[in-house]
Amino acid sequence: MTDLRALRSPLSFQLSNLQDLPHHDLLVSEEAWWKTEGIAISHAIDRAGTPWLRMFDRLGKRVDEILYPREYQTILMRGYRSGVVWRALEEKSLIPTYLLIYNISFHDPGICCPYTVSLGTAVPLAKYGSAGLQLRFLPQLLRKDDSVWQGATWMTEIKGGSDLGAAVETIARSAGDGWLLTGEKYFTSNAGAELAVVAARPEGAPAGVRGLALFLVPRYRKNGELNYFIRRLKDKIATRSVPTGEVELKDSEGYLLGTGESGVYLILEVLNLSRVANSVVSVALAQRAMADALSYAEHRIAFAKPILDHPLLRHQFEHRLTSLRSAFALAWESVQLLNDVWMDWPPYSDRYHLFRLVAHLAKYWTAEFAVDTAKWAMEVHGGLGVLAEYGAERWLREAMILAIWEGTSHRQILDGLEVMERRRAHKLLFRRLAEIAPSKELQDLESEVEHHLKLPPEEKEALAEPLFRRLATLTAETLARKSK
Ligand SMILES: Cc1cc2nc3c(=O)[nH]c(=O)nc-3n(C[C@H](O)[C@H](O)[C@H](O)COP(=O)(O)OP(=O)(O)OC[C@H]3O[C@@H](n4cnc5c(N)ncnc54)[C@H](O)[C@@H]3O)c2cc1C
């Protein structure tokens, strides 16, 4: 009989799936803190503590202040102090960041959104910002106390997030030592952040995605006035602690990161960080949903014994634990590959293209797995599963967003196809998988992928999902064998 105990805590699951767990003591103290303080705060905020927007002060001056329950700051700042952002740049490794994100999102998946977008601001600034910009802004993002600045990553506009090349209408005009940006961002998570990276088109730049550039936009102008305006905050089914708003840019001061021509690469690099985070959060959320289902199933009695002891349910737990381990292996592979390439510049190496394919597979499959597992965990709770007071429904609400933001599942499949077609990334992947565990199944799938890539364009897109799903599951299962 499979031992299900590792499900109960993020740390024991991490320990049972990673050969080497750096920052062990840090994770132990994080877990202890969440048990004694964080969990209660997080549940209370999800139910009744969502942020509010105060647009004006009492004398009518525009202030766009976000009002949070005080306790929200406690859980938010805890992660920053522990090093979810500063460790990446100080230790020159993303491993501690993603270990912490796993550990924290087991308890609160939503709060990892501010951490991820802050990382997505700090990294391009550290990589592509001029020395002057770095000196002016980077230290604030890397502070280790509650005065730390937060970041944000704003690309999407009302006309759509998938086709940014067509939908981004924000324009940047060159002015003095910087730029002035005008436009509207329709989904702006972590609205109120002190700094944001924003996609905009420099005046006169070509149409399409290649004409986009990435700008750093501070919350306040040089003269101390507001630099961007928050029109409203959205009422969401999940990530309810995070203020996601609509932002207006009106001749807002901005600073170009990299060159105008390299904007599309910078935008993709920001997405790399958040897609990998999304995969890690998805697995942690699935584990959490299973942990709650397990503790319920051990105690709920039906037909004279705990429901966990009925063969059908027991088998479902065991089978899903195997899938969870595969999902973790896939997500963690994307972390490790990203950790190898996150400081690479274009033109990129083969290793970067391999990373991209694995990241698309991981984002796609782990998000689907999280939704499916959260739904199943709700069912294990029977009727209590749909009642807000018992918490199982929260994991389904939180899971629903994971397949949508940072590029929908459709986007992952199509971008995955592109990197296979143009960069032959599947060849690198199959070679790597064959080193771990060669199999006839792998060889057959490789031939199928090759065959698929030669289909006429319409058919290639239309029929891509089953193939992409199999590629994701087989990759995950093979990688899971490596970590045994
Ligand atoms: C809570 C929340 C917070 C968010 N925070 C941010 C943020 O901070 N910053 C930010 O930039 N964005 C943010 N987003 C936006 C998010 O990234 C987008 O919602 C997402 O990228 C999808 O874009 P869209 O909603 O415009 O859908 P669309 O792009 O309009 O797509 C609609 C549907 O069409 C499908 N589709 C599109 N093109 C194709 C195609 N070629 N083939 C097949 N199907 C296709 C899509 O997959 C989707 O199912 C947030 C969204 C939410 C819900």
Image: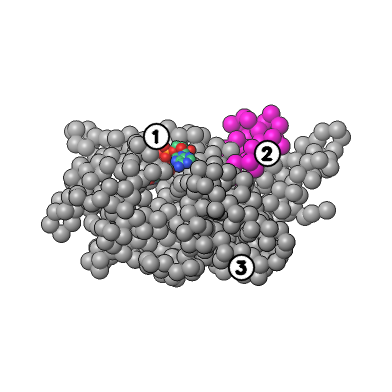
Q: Earlier in the sequence, mark 2 or mark 1?
A: 1
Circle number at residue 234: 1
Kind of residue at badge 1: Lys
Q: Position of residue 92 (x, y in %)?
A: 44, 70
| Picture quarter with the C terminus | bottom right
Residue beneath the point at 35% across and 36% down = 159
Q: Can see residue 28?
A: yes
Tag 3 secondary structure: helix
Tag 2 secondary structure: helix
Residue beneath the point at 68% across and 60% down = 442
Residue beneath the point at 38% across and 43% down = 163
Rendered position, 318 above or below 380:
below
Q: Earlier in the sequence, mark 2 or mark 3?
A: 2
Q: Is residue 302 left or right of residue 210?
A: right
Q: Is residue 393 magenta?
A: yes
Tag 1 secondary structure: loop
